Amino acid sequence: MNESGKDLPRQWSGVVEGGEGGVRVDLWLAGRLGGLSRMRVKGLIEAGRVAVGERAVKAAYRLQAGERVEVSIPPAPREGLAAEAVALSIVFEDEHVLVVDKPVGMVTHPGAGRPTGTLAAAALAHTPGMAGVGSPRRPGIVHRLDKGTSGLIVLAKTQAAYDALTAQLARRTVSRRYLCLAQGVVRRAQGVIDTSFGRDPRSRLRMAVLGEGKGKRAVTHFRVLERFGAAAEAVSLIECQLETGRTHQIRVHLASLGHPLLGDETYRGRRAAPAGDTRLAELIGGLGGVALHAAGLAFTHPTTGAPMDFSCPLPDRIGRILSHLRNRAR
């Protein structure tokens, strides 16, 4: 049998033998439906697809000898990813790697609530041979960018390229440079934010700087490029280099210093958006995400060993804000 469901009847039934009384139904089924994992069996029970004497039961139900167990088995969830013909802004491509300028609003790979319209699905349509590279639901995906972040991302077109690029990420030899606009005047010209990092204990949807010894280490190098205004209207243009690549790392790190990114409702906290400039407020409202752009990406080519270095300009959504701030400062 296999979990594809091809060798399993849609409706399965079995009778509990004399020496099997007292056994939990989930364990009993796991021993008989060899093509299904215990997690899949548990899911069937939780979905009400397992009945004893025509009555749905829970996983902990203790069977009695002579009882008939009936299971309704739907097709197993598809493991692969369906390709979607979505246009990509390709910065570089050869037979091993694909470098894309991801637009804001596009999710890197399928996740909770976003099964379609992903970069992974678009890349699979562009390069069908990418199927099976990495994981089935994330073909070719070596690293990721948040939905609200735009910019450069590299995908692997072969398994060998995938293995080589993920190894470079693990060794921290991939250079990722970001440009962002943050609230307030960042006083230090440059610095390093080095913290423990993980899920916010108050919200599973957020990440947070944690106490020492908790979570994983996260390191962000930053440099202030320009400062605009003062007090409530102040904004800083910052360049960030990632040493580690945790989820929402730059957003959380700058917010922890009291400088959340423009457009970042998740980590703005109690701090209001820059006040006193209606045009700036309008431009922030049109960001479509956060004022964060992956502007530079460098790595070693996984096959040739040649240094690869790419950059892409700020998108208009951020460039318009920057132009407004510069004009305002004149």
Image: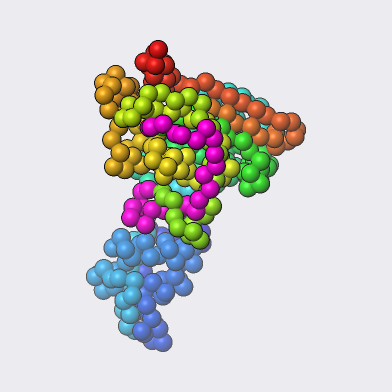
Residue 220 x/y as whole percent: 53, 41
User: Residue 168 lies in magenta, yes or no?
Assistant: no
Residue at the limit of the structure toward the left, as seen here = 55
Return the x and y of residue 195 as percentages of the image width and height. 50, 50
* Residue 203 covered by magenta stretch: yes
- Observer able to see residue 149: no
Residue drawn at x 36%, y 15% as measured from the top left = 328
The rendered magenta stretch, by its main secondary structure, is classed as: strand
- In front of the other: 186 or 141: 186
Q: Nearer the viewer, residue 57 or 239?
A: 239
**Rendered view: 307 above or below 258:** above
Image point 33% across, 30% down: which residue?
231
Q: Quick check: 200 above or below 140?
A: below
- Residue under the image location 31 percent in, 76 percent down: 61
Q: Residue furthest bottom?
A: 19
Which region is colored magenta? 183-206
- Residue 125, how many percent across, how many down? 51, 30
Rendered image quadrant of residue 229:
top left
Is residue 177 rendered to the left or right of residue 4? Answer: right
Residue 300: x %, y % from top left: 70, 35
Against 253, residue 52 (above or below) is below
131 to the left or right of 205:
right
Vertical side of 298 occupied by 90: above or below? above
Task: Identify the coloring.
Answer: rainbow
* Residue 302 found in image quarter: top right
